[in-house]
Image (spheres, helix red, strand yellow):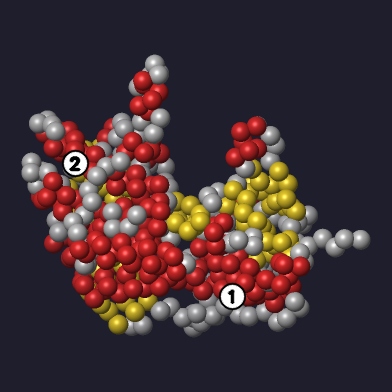
């Protein structure tokens, strides 16, 4: 009889999924060559997005293709399936998934059996039932959204520079960001910096002071990860750049091209960026695995799913006990710092399990945080030391250059940063890339393309 290989199913091709599969690929090289083990990675995209670089990609400091890592290039000994897992029946060790081929044919979802499950689908944007948000809001979690936002901001400056209508001009130059975490603050900081440079050098009839940048945060502080002192410094720094920071304020509505805030303020705007947190991936609710009250997988310190054999999890989807904390019952924060380190332990523990070896315990003390506020501006707290301005910005770049996967990407990103320091910024909107067939459809007699988001 031919022995079937042990199939390890990795659900999710993000940072944790890619690095776990990479660790398995290295540690199980002999088993993979013999055909004793098979690693299958299911991901909606054939690449991993390094999200900390999205703000710089939006500002044009890094090319979009250098923010992503092709999974097939890195995971050469793994089987990559581009698709989405819809449900998981761990009792039967099966997962149902759809692929572009099944969706095109209208075929039912495929079933895929496995022996070991690694559930690392990440998280999705946490939205609220705000009127107009679904129709007009812009997210900031994917490279497509980052580049689309860059094109959109430049297009608004084109609109403002080509009209004398004060209402259209004011709405085009008003940019509202909801959420004072890393994504919101870094995206606003980088784009405001880019837009101010663009106005000074390329738009003589648009002055930097004509633009309104508004940051809305429901709590009383921003960037809680860097501590209260640096959070207050960030607010001061942003306000010095004429950014309207509104704490303890919520977005009540964005219908009718008007952002209405809980403090009564109303801002006609064509740009509303939503970065108000994340929530567990909906896939977790479609499994028979135990979940916490917040919808994350209940996990042990060894990154196994609690009370379940042959199931593993890490990253945003997992509620992992923080054994390094003195506070009982505390869980590791769902951030990149823990995700990076959990991926290595997770890969090692799966290998230990397959070989009948003792498992390792995940334990990591918080090392600090870094955040960019634009070119040469930032805040950082590293091992208790607080940095501001240029030193923090430099630390931010050094840290993320060391963390971005593969030597190839490190070299390309470093080269782009070097060239950006020698030459002027490249400011151009390539919005047509999002709808490349629009011109041909019109030439062939079709109807003019209407972007559903253009109403905002």
Q: Position of residue 249 (x, y in %)?
A: 28, 53
Mark 1 vs 2, N-terminal side: 2
Q: Disc 1 to disc 2, how far (Cα)?
A: 47 Å
Q: Nearer the viewer, residue 256 or 206?
A: 206
Q: Position of residue 306 (x, y in %)?
A: 67, 68
Q: Quadrant of the C terminus?
A: top left
Q: What is the crowding at mark 2: few (fewer than 14 residues within 10 Å), some, or many (at least 20)? A: some
What residue sits right under mark 2 in the picture?
Answer: 157
Q: Residue at x 92, y 61 (%)?
A: 1
Asked if residue 14 lies left or right of residue 454, the reply is right
Q: Residue at x 21, y 55 (%)?
A: 425
What residue sits right under mark 1 in the picture?
Answer: 345
Corner quadrant of residue 230:
bottom left
Q: Nearer the viewer, residue 324 or 98?
A: 98
**Residue found at the far right of this picture:** 1
Provide the secondary structure element on which disc 1 rests: helix
């Amino acid at each position: 009889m031919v022995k079937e290989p042990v199939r390890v199913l990795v659900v999710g091709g993000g940072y944790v999924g890619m690095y776990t599969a990479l660790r398995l690929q290295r540690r199980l090289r002999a088993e993979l060559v013999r055909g004793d083990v098979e690693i299958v990675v299911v991901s909606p995209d054939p690449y991993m997005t390094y999200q900390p670089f999205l703000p710089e990609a939006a500002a044009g400091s890094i090319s979009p293709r250098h923010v992503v890592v092709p999974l097939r290039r890195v995971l050469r000994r793994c089987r990559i399936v581009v698709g989405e897992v819809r449900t998981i029946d761990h009792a039967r060790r099966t997962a149902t998934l759809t692929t572009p081929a099944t969706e095109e044919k209208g075929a039912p979802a495929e079933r895929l059996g496995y022996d070991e499950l690694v559930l690392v689908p990440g998280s999705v944007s946490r939205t609220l039932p705000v009127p107009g948000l679904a129709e007009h809001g812009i997210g900031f979690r994917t490279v497509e959204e980052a580049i689309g936002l860059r094109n959109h901001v430049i297009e608004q400056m084109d609109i403002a520079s080509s009209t004398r209508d004060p209402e259209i001009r004011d709405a085009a130059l008003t940019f509202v960001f909801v959420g004072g975490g890393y994504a919101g603050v870094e995206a606003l900081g980088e784009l405001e910096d880019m837009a101010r440079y663009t106005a000074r050098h390329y738009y003589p009839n648009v002055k930097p002071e004509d633009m309104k940048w508004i940051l809305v945060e429901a709590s009383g502080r921003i960037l809680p990860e860097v501590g209260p002192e640096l959070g207050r410094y960030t607010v001061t720094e942003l306000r010095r750049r004429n950014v309207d920071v509104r704490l303890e304020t919520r977005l009540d509505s964005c219908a009718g091209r008007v952002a209405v805030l809980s403090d009564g303020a109303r801002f006609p705007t064509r740009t509303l960026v939503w970065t108000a947190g994340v929530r567990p991936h909906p896939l977790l609710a479609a499994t028979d695995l135990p979940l916490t009250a917040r919808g994350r997988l209940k996990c042990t310190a060894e990154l196994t799913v609690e009370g379940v054999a042959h199931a593993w999890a890490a990253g945003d989807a997992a509620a992992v006990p923080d054994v390094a904390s003195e506070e009982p019952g505390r869980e590791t924060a769902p951030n990149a710092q823990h995700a990076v380190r959990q991926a290595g332990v997770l890969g090692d523990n799966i290998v230990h399990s397959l070989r009948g070896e003792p498992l390792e315990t995940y334990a990591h003390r918080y090392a600090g945080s870094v955040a960019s506020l634009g070119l040469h501006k930032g805040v950082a707290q590293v091992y208790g030391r607080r940095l501001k301005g240029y030193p923090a910005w430099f630390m931010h770049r050094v840290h993320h250059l060391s963390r971005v996967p593969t030597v190839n990407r490190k070299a390309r990103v470093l080269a782009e940063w070097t060239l950006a320091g020698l030459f002027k910024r490249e400011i151009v909107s390539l919005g047509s890339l999002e709808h490349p067939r629009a011109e041909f459809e019109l030439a062939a007699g079709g109807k003019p393309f209407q972007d559903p988001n253009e109403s905002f």
